[in-house]
Amino acid sequence: MIISRNTDTKSMYAALGISDSVYKFSMEILDGLKPRFDEIDKTAEYNQLKVLKAMQDSKVSEACLLGTTGYGYNDLGRETLEAVYASIFHTEDALVRPQITCGTHALALALMSNLRPGDELLSPVGKPYDTLEEVIGIRPSKGSLAEYGITYRQVDLLPDGGFDYDGIKKAINAKTKLVTIQRSKGYQTRPTLSTGRIGELISFIKGIKPDVICMVDNCYGEFVERIEPTDAGADMAVGSLIKNPGGGLAPIGGYIAGKKECVENAAYRLTSPGLGKEVGASLGILRDFYHGLFLAPTVTAGALKGAIFAANAYEKLGFKVVPNGTESRHDIIQAVEFGSPEGVIAFCRGIQAAAPVDSFVTPEPWDMPGYDSKVIMAAGAFVSGSSIELSADGPIKPPYAVYFQGGLTCEHAIFGIMKTLQSVSEAGLVKI
Ligand SMILES: *Cc1c(COP(=O)(O)O)cnc(C)c1O
């Protein structure tokens, strides 16, 4: 007996709680986005080949997928993976380790290892990511750079998002040792910086002080463009493996790709003076690092498409979205300003309801370590807290913006946004 099933896609959406009107609204927007999506596919194609070439050039072998234990001396897989990252980022060296626990840790490591007491750190692009406030000591914290006598200066972006070149010139002084440039907007509504703009900023800074170290917080930016900040003059690019470059498969980790000396400093701080890169067993994790990196260009492309769909859908409903529906993209984050806590909460509940894991739980705002207001987070991920997987979060403070990112496949990213549209409309905040 043949059981008849309705294999129509629209009824599958309906079975997952998407109403006719949300379906129709979404499909119309997606139809108009085809040329944009084609461009993204071309970037993914380029980056896929770039990753493949790096793996081939570095002679990744089956043995590289295995791991070491104990001290981890002569870990072929670890050393080869670091060569692959250095090749992708066109840098002298890289540190790519499961012992780097997250993005904040990678950034803290890059800063603490390359700064010494009496040095000054400069951010020429405004306030850095929330968790870095405690690393730097903007908010007092145990073990901060401030406790070690490292001072900090900041020059905000101009109201139009441009660099305050005069202010930056004035801020650079004899103590300025390292400049930190955050590519992505993080929890702000300023524009994300393209690698082109980062390059302009770095050449301006090096024109004033050539030996200053320029570090880029590359979180969420990897593989969005054909080049990375290290192709635009950055001495170090730093990021998290549970974001873009882990491709959704890396279960932990961070990377620092850059000048040999910068990476060496970081390695001696991560392990110990005298040991540096020579130790750090990879255990059984390298297969996921390689596998995830290989998939990262297409995973990033899917996440980007979801972000562009979200921008266009919410813009059409009258909300302020950053970036807007037509702007070019330099990271995978999409901000939507709801202007009310209810909007942020409804959006996050929609994302949660779209997850493959924990879809039945209801996210609530809570006091998270490292953040100065309550934050609501939606994630039902295979890797806990992974934000290359479909996820959304928003601090419960004005302008009540929600930040959406990720989706391991384009189809899932789009479905997630459809669930938010459903949730926001069921909460009575919009009419679709
Ligand atoms: C995510 C992120 C970080 C911190 O990474 P964690 O892995 O969450 O510690 C730092 N900077 C930016 C711009 C980020 O997006």
Image (spheres, grey):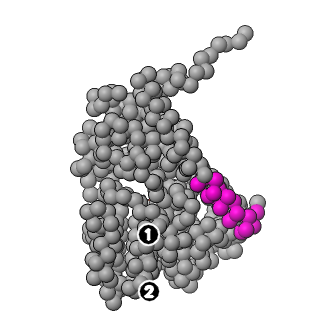
Q: Is residue 54 magenta?
A: yes
Coordinates of residue 183 in the picture (x, y in percent): 42, 64
Please report the bounds of the magenta region as a residue range: 43-61
At x 32% / y 55%, what residue is drawn?
189
- Residue denoted by label 2: 210
Coordinates of residue 259 in the picture (x, y in percent): 54, 79
At x 52% / y 23%, what residue is drawn?
10
Q: Relative to residue 146, is residue 243 drawn left or right?
A: right
For mark 1, give the secondary structure: helix
Query: Foreground: 148 or 430?
Result: 430
Q: Relative to residue 91, is residue 429 drawn left or right?
A: left
Q: Relative to residue 208, is residue 78 drawn left or right?
A: right
Residue type beneath disc 2: Pro
- Residue denoted by label 1: 198
At x 45% / y 35%, what residue is drawn?
29
The quarter in which the N terminus is drawn is top right
Query: Foreground: 294 or 370?
Result: 294
